[in-house]
Image: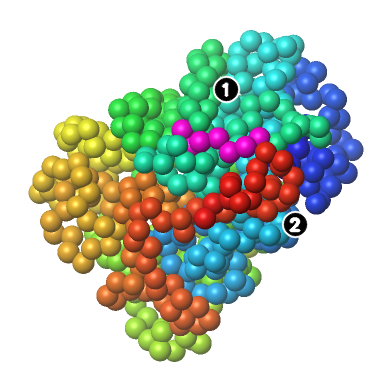
Amino acid sequence: MKKYIYILIVGLVILTGSCSKDYLDTNPTDQTTPGQVFLNVENAFAALNGIYRNFYTDGDLWSTSYGAENFGPSAINIVTDLMGEDMVQRDAGNYWFVYDYLYWMRTSIAGTSDHPYAYWYMYYSIIDNVNNILSRIDDLPGSATDRNNVKGQALALRAYSYMYLIQFYARTYKGHEQEKGVPIYTEPTDKNSVGKGRGTVQDVFDQINEDLDNAITAFQSASEQRHKSHIDKYVAYGLKSRVAMLMEDWATAADAASKALEKSGLKLMSNAELLTGFNTVANPEWMWGSEVNDAQSTSWNSFFNHMDSRISSSYANSSRKVISKFLYDQIGDNDVRKQWFKAPVNTDEYENPDLYAEGPDVNYNQMKFKVKGEGSWAGDYLYMRAAEMYLNQAEAECRQGHYTEARTLMLTLLGDRDPDLAAIMDALPNGNVITVNSYADDMSSINLLDFILLERRIELWGEGFRIFDIRRQKTGFIRDYPGTNHYSPGDLGDYGLFDVADPESWEWVYMLPQSEFDGNPSLDADADQNP
């Protein structure tokens, strides 16, 4: 690891010793000094809060520039959906995220501004900071239940970070277990540490599962979750379910998702709540998210700035994120989720693009994610909710041939969203093998698994799952279908009209940043770089 990140402070993570940027001077005068972080368990909690605070960051914390699209996990949710076929970058706007949509990003490794560098830096920063916590937590004064809470969170954060690193910098788990993964660090580093080589994909997944199992064990004897920004036992089970889905370990995926749903007070959103903008941790369905108030909102460098085109000053106002025509057409007319998107009414918007150069009123425009109130940038960030766990469990049960259980779970999730879905699902044959690709013009012969995967695409649109699902399902994607709206009437033209049908494609895998090879003697650019 090129970046040696080894000092924590209360409320802020200090990144030091390696970067082209120097964060040593960012310690605010009213905060605890680094030496005080490990005086007691309460200070360790504060150090964790610093890590979570950097999940939404203003400026160039993770890169030397391009902070407008490197503002943490919620930015990654935009990227990973734009890399699929269900979210369309309708306009160029200020060109933020355009290169992700057009697949011009994975080889941008020479500098320290683009995603291959920023994501590597961000997740290894989290890893090294939690390694510092884990190396000391057992000896800190404080209650045993609080120590276990901190330990559980730190372990889960490390697993979470490796889960994203392995998905960005290696091919999907199944069938590639012995390919090169990413370097694994479980101890703190300092300026004298020597970087490690790439472990195998299997090695990384073994570490992820070990961390999650140990986190869950720690949480069994831990104090209660203090805030929804904190990972707790149920979020750890949710992460365990995500990882098992990637590994095609269906029994574990179903069991972990079921346990995640046991969280007290957790319930699915009502139809009215589904239309309120996905912007508050007070939502009863949210399991994990960042609370971002007016004072902490990162304005230009924020998820909502790129998604809510109602705001005239927003990037989204001239760079609309819209749902693909194909997926929109699969949503029933009585399904409340159809209201997440603008109905196609402007028949001339492509013939007269100047009339629709700005604003929300374009065909298929997203209205799922909205700020809490116009005139403010405030809006909380979602990282996990109950619907995902229902979908994980339903797919995993279906894959095992447990069709009754899968149908019951889907009906529980979707019954209120669309009153017609029960009859539609009843008419579907059982089946646990995918029979259609990500796009098919004839959906009349789909089976139960196809239905679950289609509903997953609708339900989780914009929440950052699509390209990872495409990879693990090994379906590829098709954008250039008859009637497609993967076309921009402006600067993008028809650049988005391409397909990546090869399920083994390297197009979905970032190359490692050049700075890692420059600073890590255990890596060789010829032998260890991705194709």
The residue pinned by badge 2 equals 64
Give percent across and percent down for residue 502.
Answer: 35, 58
Q: Is residue 27 above or below residue 489?
A: above
Instruction: Specify the quadrant that holds the N terminus.
Output: top right
Q: Is residue 389 visible?
A: no
Taking the spot 64% from the left edge, 26% from the top edge, the residue there is: 186
The tag earlier along the polypeptide, 1 or 2, is: 2
Distance, label 1 to label 2, CA atoms, is 32 Å
Residue 157 in magenta stretch = no
Q: Is residue 293 above or below residue 246?
A: below
The residue pinned by badge 1 equals 152
Q: Which residues are magenta?
A: 196-202
Rendered image coloring scheme: rainbow
Q: Nearer the viewer, residue 77 or 479?
A: 479
Give percent across and percent down for residue 96.
Answer: 60, 66
Question: Amino acid under label 1?
Answer: Gly
